[in-house]
C-alpha cells in the first residue's frame, strides 16, 4: 500500500517531522500527569505512514484502550520518514512497539529477526479468522514457516476523472467499458495545445497505481512465475510503449510531474485523469476541488486480452521483536485483525478491509465519490510483484524509467536494460 506514499496538496507535510503524537483516548501528549508522555513499558507506541488514515486509526486505538485499559501512542508520518524511523529503530534497538509492514520490506525485517514472532498466538487465537484473509497477503508476512504480521487491509486501483473537463469537452464519463486504446483517444481530446490541461499523468514511481496495471492487462508481467524479469516479454514491451505514447502526447512534461506530483496536478485542475490506489480516497475526500469536480471509474481493459487488471497489495500489523510489551503488542495486533475492527475500519472510511466481504462499508462511507469501481476491480487482480529483496531492483527500475520518461532513451531498449538489471539483482538474493 505504497501510497500511502504520495499525499495531496492539502495534506502535504514536512519530510522531517511527525505530524502528530497523541495518546489513546484522545489526550494530548503535553507532559502533564494525565495523557502526558509515558515511559516505554507502560504505553504501546504505534507507528503508521499515512496521515489521511490517522483519525480513523486513532478511533480504533481509543476502542482498544477502552476495552483493555492498555494505553497507546500514535505516530503518523509520511512514507520516507516512516522507513527512516523504522530502520534507525531497528539498528538502535528502539523500534515502535506496533507498526505497519509492507511487501517491499517484509522479508528484510523478518529474516533479520526484527519482528515479533506471533505464530503460536495466531494459531491459537479464538478471535482471528485467518481463513477470511487473502492468501497472498497472509503469505507475504510468513517467513521460514513463522508468522510475523496480521493483515490490515487490501487495496486496488481505479481511474479518477474530472467530470467538469469531460462536460466541457462533451465527452461521456468513463463507465468501465473503455479499452486502453479508447482511453488514449479520449486523453488526446482532453489535452490542450497551450499546455493548460492534459489528458493523463503518471510518473515512473506510479508503478502499482498506473503502468504496471497496463502491463498485466496487455498480457505482460513484471516478474515471471520463476522470479525472472518480465521486461523482455513482448507484451510487457507493448504495454510500456503504449505508456511511452501517453508520455509524449497526453501528459505534462516529466519535470513538471516529478516536481509537483500527479495527485497534486489532478487536485489543481491541470489533468483530466489519473489512476490511483484506494489508499488515496481519504485524502481526496478532503480536497475541495477533487470532491467538487471528480469521480471514479474502473481501469480500462485491453482490446486483445479483454482484461482490466488491478494490482493489489495489503499491509500487515507487526510488532518489534524487542518490544518490552510483547503480550500487549500482540493483543493490539489481534484486535486490529478481528472481524469487528476490520468492519469498523471500513465503515470509518479508513481503508478497504482485508477481511473478506467487509469492504461495502468502505464504499458506502461517502457519497462524495462512487467507490464501487475499487470493489469491481477485485474481479481481476494481480498481487503486487515482489521478491525477497524487492527494493534492490524496484528502486533502480523506477530510476531507469526516468530516461524514457524524459525523452532521453528509447522505451523498448530501456525495458531490455531493466530486465538485465533485475535478473542480476534477483540472482544475488540467493547467493
Image: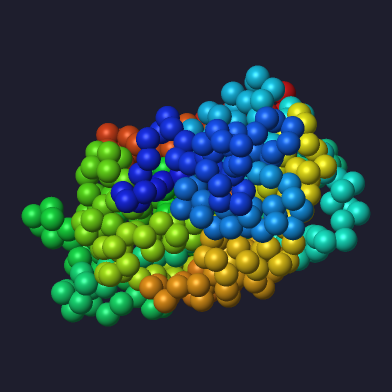
Quarter of the figure that contains the C terminus: top right
Q: Residue at x 26, y 52 (%)?
A: 265
Residue furthest to the top in view is 92
Q: Residue at x 43, y 52 (%)?
A: 211
Which quadrant would residue 56 be assigned to in this image?
bottom right
- In this view of the protein, which residue sits in the foreground, 238 or 197? 197
Q: Residue at x 52, y 43 (%)?
A: 28
- Along the horizontal axis of the image, is 163 left or right of 87? left
Where residue 100 appears, as percent x and y from the top left, is 62, 44
Which quadrant would residue 318 be assigned to in this image?
top right
Q: Residue at x 78, y 49 (%)?
A: 331
Q: Is residue 18 visible?
A: yes
- In this view of the protein, which residue sits in the foreground, 30 or 189? 30
For residue 62, above or below residue 87: below
Where residue 424 appears, as percent x and y from the top left, is 59, 28
For residue 88, above or below residue 407: above
For residue 135, above or below residue 409: below
Q: Is residue 212 visible?
A: no
Amino acid at each position: 500500500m505504497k501510497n500511502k506514499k504520495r499525499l495531496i496538496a492539502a495534506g502535504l507535510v514536512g519530510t522531517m517531522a511527525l505530524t502528530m503524537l497523541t495518546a489513546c483516548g484522545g489526550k494530548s501528549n503535553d507532559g502533564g500527569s494525565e495523557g502526558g508522555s509515558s515511559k516505554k513499558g507502560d504505553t504501546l507506541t504505534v507507528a503508521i505512514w499515512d496521515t489521511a488514515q490517522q483519525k480513523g486509526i486513532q478511533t480504533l486505538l481509543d476502542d482498544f484502550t477502552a476495552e483493555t485499559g492498555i494505553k497507546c501512542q500514535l505516530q503518523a508520518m509520511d512514507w520516507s520518514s516512516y522507513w527512516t524511523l523504522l530502520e534507525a529503530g531497528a539498528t538502535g534497538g528502539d523500534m515502535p512497539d506496533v507498526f505497519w509492514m509492507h511487501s517491499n520490506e517484509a522479508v528484510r525485517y523478518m529474516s533479520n529477526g526484527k519482528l515479533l514472532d506471533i505464530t503460536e498466538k495466531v494459531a491459537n487465537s479464538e478471535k482471528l479468522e485467518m481463513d477470511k484473509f487473502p492468501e497472498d497477503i497472509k503469505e507475504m508476512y510468513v517467513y521460514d514457516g513463522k508468522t510475523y504480521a496480521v493483515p490490515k487491509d487490501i487495496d486496488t486501483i481505479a481511474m479518477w476523472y474530472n467530470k467538469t473537463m469531460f462536460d466541457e469537452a462533451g465527452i461521456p464519463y468513463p463507465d468501465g467499458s473503455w479499452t486502453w486504446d479508447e482511453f488514449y483517444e479520449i486523453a488526446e481530446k482532453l489535452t490542450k495545445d497551450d499546455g493548460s490541461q492534459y489528458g493523463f499523468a503518471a510518473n515512473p514511481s506510479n508503478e502499482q497505481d498506473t503502468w504496471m496495471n497496463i502491463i498485466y492487462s496487455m498480457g505482460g508481467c513484471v516478474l515471471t512465475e520463476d522470479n525472472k524479469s518480465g521486461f523482455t516479454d513482448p507484451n510487457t514491451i507493448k504495454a510500456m510503449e503504449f505508456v511511452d505514447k501517453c508520455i509524449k502526447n497526453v501528459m505534462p512534461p516529466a519535470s513538471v510531474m516529478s516536481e509537483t506530483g500527479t495527485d497534486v496536478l489532478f487536485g489543481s485542475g491541470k489533468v483530466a485523469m489519473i489512476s490511483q490506489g484506494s489508499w488515496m480516497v481519504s485524502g481526496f475526500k478532503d480536497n475541495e476541488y477533487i470532491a467538487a469536480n471528480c469521480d471514479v471509474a474502473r481501469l480500462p481493459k485491453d482490446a486483445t486480452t479483454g482484461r482490466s487488471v488491478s494490482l493489489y497489495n495489503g499491509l500487515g500489523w507487526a510488532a518489534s521483536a524487542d518490544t518490552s510489551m510483547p503480550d500487549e503488542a500482540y493483543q493490539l495486533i489481534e484486535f486490529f485483525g478481528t472481524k469487528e475492527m476490520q468492519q469498523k475500519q471500513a465503515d470509518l472510511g479508513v481503508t478497504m478491509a482485508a477481511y473478506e466481504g467487509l469492504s461495502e462499508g468502505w464504499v458506502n462511507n461517502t457519497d462524495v465519490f462512487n467507490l464501487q469501481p475499487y470493489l469491481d476491480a477485485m474481479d481481476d487482480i494481480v498481487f503486487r510483484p515482489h521478491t525477497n529483496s524487492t527494493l534492490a531492483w524496484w528502486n533502480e527500475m523506477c530510476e531507469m524509467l526516468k530516461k524514457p520518461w524524459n525523452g532521453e532513451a528509447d522505451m523498448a531498449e530501456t525495458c531490455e536494460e531493466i530486465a538485465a538489471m533485475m535478473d542480476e539483482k534477483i540472482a544475488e538474493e540467493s547467493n
